[in-house]
Amino acid sequence: MSNLSTREKVAFTLCISFAFLLLISGIYDFWIIEFNAQDLLMSIGAFLLLLSLALIPKIFFLPFTDIFKSKETPSIGIPKVQQCIMFSGALLCAFGFALRLFF
């Protein structure tokens, strides 16, 4: 993390902060306010998506066309772990949305 620029460190910190805020809010809503599993699944999925975005802070500062042209992912750590976190977050969000839509 020492090779990140200041703005990438700020993006990393903001993504992590919003992710945990969203997770804590989702757990609070589930536990205290309403026992609704769909909302909890969507909160956990959104947490994982924000966490995976925090692992690639350079994506916020690249031009949109360069993101799809690049063959390597500019991630912090192992790119496969970041991709697994992103796909599991998207899957949980989709599953929570489907449960909310059909039940």
Image (tube, rainbow, N blue to C red):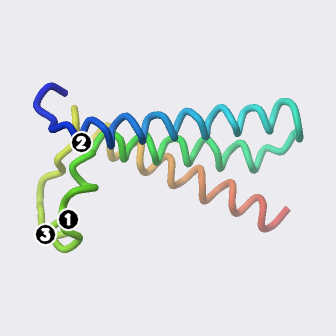
Q: Are marks 3 and 1 in contact (CB under 8 Å)?
A: yes
Residue 1: % across, % down: 19, 27
From the viewer's perspective, is residue 53 above or below residue 99? above
Query: Left or right: 25 with respect to 76?
Result: right
Instruction: From the viewer's perspective, tell me whether residue 46 is left or right of residue 34.
Output: left
Q: Is residue 50 above or below residue 98?
A: above
Residue topped by disc 3 = 69
Which is nearer the N-term, disc 2 or disc 1? 2
Front-lying residue, 96 or 30 = 30
The tag on residue 8 is: 2
* Residue pictured at 69% horizontal, 61% vertical: 97
Amino acid residing under circle 3: Lys
- Kind of residue sitting beneath label 1: Ile
Q: Quadrant of residue 8?
A: top left
The mark tally for this picture is 3
- Picture coordinates of residue 40, whole percent (x, y): 72, 42
- For this view, does 103 lie left or right of residue 84? right
Which numbered disc flags the more N-terminal residue, 3 or 2? 2
- Local secondary structure at mark 1: helix
Residue 56 image-quadrant placement: top left
